[in-house]
Image (spheres, grey):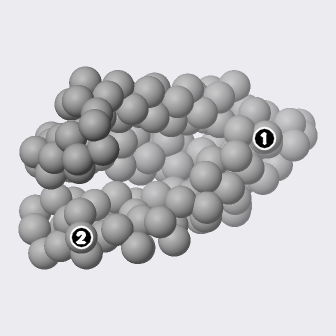
Amino acid sequence: MPSNVRNFFWLNFLALVLGVAVAILTAPKNAAIAAAGGLGPGFVIGVQVSVEALLLLLLWLIAFKRQNWARWVWLAMFVLGLPGYIAIFKNLFGISAAGAISLVQVILEIVALYFVFTGNAAAWFRRTTEAESV
């Protein structure tokens, strides 16, 4: 695995771990929002676990199975999710530990995306012979 892909993997893995911390810190607020919509805390937990599992699957497909399409799906999910993240940031997180951790997550994800689309990662996803020796 090239160094850029390895960096992408570990930065995103750390971001996912931080996401669990954010989910724990924001659980009461998320449960209240769900309750206002007639849903229980089990729904919130189910959505969070499902999203985390999907992201872990995509991360595995990108880093260990060299699936180029998964890399583009990851980018698309990030880009499409960013406006919503910005819109809810102040209301959901504000100036709090969860907000600070969440900002670190976004920064890690941006840096990770840079790595997976630059340097030795590009040839690796094209499966060229020069990338095999990296």
- Which residue does the image show at 70% across and 46% down from the upper left? 73
Q: Which residue is the site of mark 2?
A: 91
- Return the residue nearer the eye: 6 or 18: 18
- Residue 86 against residue 111 in the figure, above or below: below
What residue is pinned by disc 1? 68
Q: Position of residue 132 (x, y in %)?
A: 78, 34
Q: Is residue 9 visible?
A: yes
As drawn, is 110 to the left or to the right of 31? right
SS class, disc 1: helix
For residue 21, the mark is none
The residue drawn where x is 30% and y is 44% is 37
Q: Is residue 131 visible?
A: no
Quadrant holding the C terminus: top right
- Given residues 23 and 124, the one toward you in this image is 23
The foreground one among 112 and 51 is 51
Q: Residue at point 49% right, 49% down?
A: 7
Say whether disc 1 or disc 2 marks the residue closer to the N-terminus: 1
